[in-house]
Image: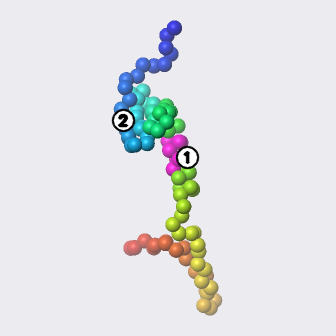
Amino acid sequence: MSDSKPACGPPVDVVKTDGVRVARCPCGTLHVTFQRTGVTMQLSAEYFNEVVQALSLSKTILEPQDEPNVRVIHAPVSRGFVTIETPGFKKPSN
């Protein structure tokens, strides 16, 4: 029986931390290894990008917010516009 998997060289580390190792195989496959469990996922570059986006979005959603998203509304003094301020927003300098 012949192996249908193409022969690849050894993967090269892209990033290695205490918790995760990401390596690229010469064929383009990315190997993501979770150091604690020893589990390795082999992902195409396109799928790797989808996983990274999903993890990044999850991190943003799950992180506690430093400041609540509160808006302050100032009533107009006379016939004018209502001013809405978002705390922490800085106007760009010219």
Residue 13 image label: 2
Which residue is tagged 1?
54
Seen as rendered, the residue at the extreme front is 36
Q: Residue at x 54, y 64 (%)?
A: 65
How many neighbours does mark 1 have within 10 angstroms: few (below 14), some (14-19), or many (20 or more)?
A: few
Type of amino acid under label 1: Ala
Quarter of the image where the C terminus is located: bottom left
**Magenta-colored span:** 49-56
Type of amino acid under label 2: Asp
Seen as rendered, the residue at the extreme top is 1
Label located before the other in sequence (2 or 1): 2
Colour approach in the figure = rainbow
Q: Which residue is drawn at 62% across and 85% down?
A: 75
Where residue 34 appears, x then y in whole percent? 47, 38
Q: Which residue is drawn at 50% across and 44% down?
A: 52
- Whether residue 44 is visible to the viewer of this picture, yes or no, is no
How many neighbours does mark 2 have within 10 angstroms: few (below 14), some (14-19), or many (20 or more)?
A: some
Residues 90 and 15: in front is 15
